[in-house]
Structure formats: structure tokens, C-alpha cells
Amino acid sequence: MTAELQPWQTLAARELLDCRPWLRVSAERVRLPNGHEIDAFYHIDMPDWAQIFAVTADGRVPLIEHWKQGARALSLELPAGYLDDGESAEAAARRELREETGVEAADWRYLGRFFMDGNRGCGASHIFLARGARVVGAPQREDSEIMAQHWLTLAEVRAAWRGGRMGNIATIAAVGLALTALEGDDAPD
């Protein structure tokens, strides 16, 4: 790492808002590697979450559609949810897939952990590809989870992904990674 690309130093932090476990906002005084200081660099601390691209043996993918109050819009998304304290990303992914869709899967592949906003924080998404998905029961959603469930073919998922039907950047990224992984798995050696 060159001198310019070293981590910033946090010289002080002042908590502005504490709504744990969902949100914490602080103002940090930071020093950059070149000596420049920023008096109020805002950091948003949010929990990590898991997103699941599940696919059945016949190539169908469960998606959920629900109202997103922050965006003030309906959103077509992958099943997803926050990691509970001490819970592994895969355990959260398995739990959220079952709770939101009533689906379990036989084969799980971790596609990685990705941050949403490198400037502010805002948690990170753990993305999973789950193959061999099958319905094992009814969804077990929380009272705040008012969702419509859709089953799309892989071709329909790709069309929704490319055509702007998905507005959540985390979903768009996860779908792209999963489709790429599936294509790689099907590619000849």
C-alpha cells in the first residue's frame, strides 16, 4: 500500500443518534494519510444482512415484493434479512429464506460480503446462492413483513434485472453475482 492509500485515523468520535440495533450515527474527526483533517465525517453504523438467490431444480427463483418506506416505492427483491447478534451469515440466510418464502435449499454457496456505502458505512450484505430450493411450508413472516411472493424463471429474473423492475441496488448486485455464478457453473470445462 502506498502512503496515500493508508487507512484514515479516527481522532475523535461523537455519537449523534443511537437507535441500536438498527442504526447508530456518529460524527468523527479524521486525519487522512496526507495530513488533511475532516472535523465532521459522518458514519452510519447498521447491522449486516444476508440476501439469498434461491433456485429450484427446474430453474424457478422465489422473489418477494413489498413496500420500502425509505424509498417510498414497491420493490421486487431477493429474500433477505439482518443477522441476529452472534448469528453466522449462512444461518441468517437459511432462516430468512425459510421465514420469508417457506423455502429451504440443499446446496449453499457464499458469494461474498459487500458494503453498501463506502463513505458512510450502512452495513454490508452477505450474498448466497442456494440451489436445490424447495417449498417446505408456509412463510413465517413478522407482522411488519407484508409481502407478495413471486416465482420467476431464470429468464424472467434476468429480464426483471436488466429491465429495471428491481430498484434496490443490493438486489441488483446480488442477482448479477448469482446469475454469473450459475453461468460459470454451467460453463464447459
Image: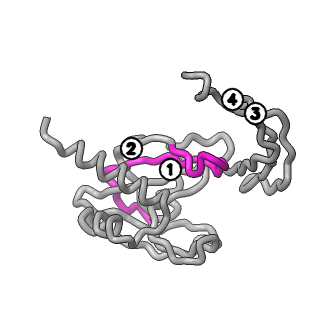
Camera-side residue of 79 and 35: 35
Q: Secondary structure at mark 1?
A: helix
Which residue range is magenta in the image? 114-137
Q: Nearer the viewer, residue 34 or 79?
A: 34
Of marks 3 and 2, which one's residue comes earlier in the chain? Answer: 3
> Which-is-in-front pick, marks 3 and 1?
3
Where residue 107 sits, quadrant-wise, is: top left
Marks 3 and 4: in contact by CB < 8 Å? no
| Identity, as a three-letter code, of the amino acid under mark 1 | Ala
Relative image position of residue 106 (x, y in whole percent): 35, 47
Q: Residue at x 38, y 65 (%)?
A: 62
The residue indicated by pointer 2 is 108
Residue that numbered label 1 is attached to: 93
Categorize mark 3 by other alpha carbons within 10 Å: few (<14), some (14-19), many (20+): some
The answer to whether the residues at label 2 and label 1 have Cβ atoms under 8 Å apart is: yes
At a point 42% along the width and 59% down the height, the residue shown is 172
Instruction: Tell me what residue is drawn at x 51 percent, y 77 percent.
Output: 74
Q: Nearer the viewer, residue 109 or 137?
A: 109
Residue 78 percent across, percent down from the top left: 44, 61
Residue 134 colored in magenta in the image: yes
Q: CA distance from mark 1 to mark 4?
A: 41 Å
Q: Is residue 47 visible?
A: no
Q: CA distance from mark 2 to mark 1?
A: 10 Å
Q: Amino acid at mark 4?
A: Asn
Q: Nearer the viewer, mark 1 or mark 4?
A: 4
What amino acid does circle 3 point to?
Arg
Which numbered marker is on residue 34? 4
